Structures are given as C-alpha cells and as structure tokens.
C-alpha cells in the first residue's frame, strides 16, 4: 500500500468512532464535520488537497479505486455517517434509490407507462 493511501486512511480514522450498530461488522461513524441539515445533508465532509470532499467517497476510492460519474456509493449499513469501506458499495443511481426506498418502507418508484393503443 502506498504512503498516500495509508496517510488518507489514518486521517479518516482520527475522526472515526467504531460502533456496533447491529450490522454484520462495526460501523466507522464519522465524528468530524458534515454537510449540514438541508436536502441531501448529513454526509461526512473533510478537506483533501484544499477541496471539501465526501468522506464515504474518499474512503471507498482509497480502498477500491475510481468511482465513475454514473455511479454512486451506497451505505449498505444504511448509516450516512459510516465511512467503513466494507459497508460501502458502488451502485447506479436507480439502485441507490431502490435501496433507500426499501429501507424506509416505501413502495419503490416506478416510471409511469403510457397505455398501449389497442
């Protein structure tokens, strides 16, 4: 492992509390700053190379590599503050929404279909 990857991992771990939340393995809950309480808020944030970054994406990228623009990082443990790379998975936007809706007990959204002419 490169020194840069180890340095990034160490920086992340300095702001993490390891907590058993009932998921398969303990969550690494971020105790540093986050994105606030607005729409889409509550995600961990950190400075990296003078840029503010989402910590769960940094954690995933640091362990597993590049995340394409058409993919998102899903928290399999359903906890936005968790930055444990073992709890993060790269998925499509649609899959991420389906998982969110399922976790919240919502009926998954379906695209409306136009009636087929008879």
Image: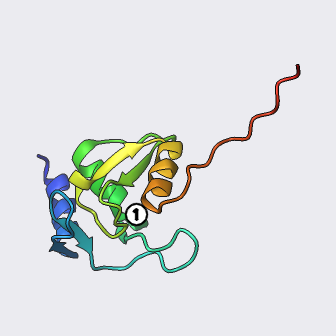
Q: For the C terminus, give its image quadrant.
A: top right
Q: Is residue 8 left or right of residue 72?
A: left
Question: In the image, is 15 to the left or to the right of 61?
Answer: left
- Residue in view at x 56 percent, y 77 percent: 38
- In the image, residue 4 sits, relative to residue 37, either above or below, namely above
Which residue sits furthest top?
118
Total count of labels: 1
Residue for point 11% across, 46% down: 1
The image position of residue 43, as x and y in percent, is 42, 69
Q: Quadrant of residue 54?
A: bottom left
Query: Residue 71's spot in the image, x, y percent?
Result: 46, 42
- Which of 114/3 is in front? 114
Q: Residue at x 51, y 51 (%)?
A: 97
> Which residue is identified by label 1?
54
Is disc 1 surrounded by few (<14), some (14 to 19) or many (20+) residues within 10 Å? Answer: some
Percent position (x, y) of residue 79?
34, 66
Instruction: Give percent across and percent down for residue 94.
Output: 53, 44
Whether residue 101 sits left or right of residue 74 in the image: it is right
Q: Is residue 28 above or below residue 96?
A: below
């Amino acid at each position: 492992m490169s020194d840069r990857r180890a340095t990034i991992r160490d920086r992340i771990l300095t702001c993490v509390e390891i907590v058993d939340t009932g998921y398969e393995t303990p969550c690494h809950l971020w105790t540093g700053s986050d994105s606030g309480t607005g729409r889409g808020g509550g995600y961990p944030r950190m400075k990296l190379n003078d840029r503010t970054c989402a910590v769960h994406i940094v954690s995933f990228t640091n362990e597993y590599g590049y995340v394409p623009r058409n993919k998102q990082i899903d928290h399999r443990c359903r906890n936005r503050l968790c930055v444990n790379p073992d709890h993060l998975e790269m998925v499509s936007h649609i899959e991420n929404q389906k998982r969110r809706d399922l976790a919240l007990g919502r009926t998954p959204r379906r695209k409306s279909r136009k009636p087929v002419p008879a």
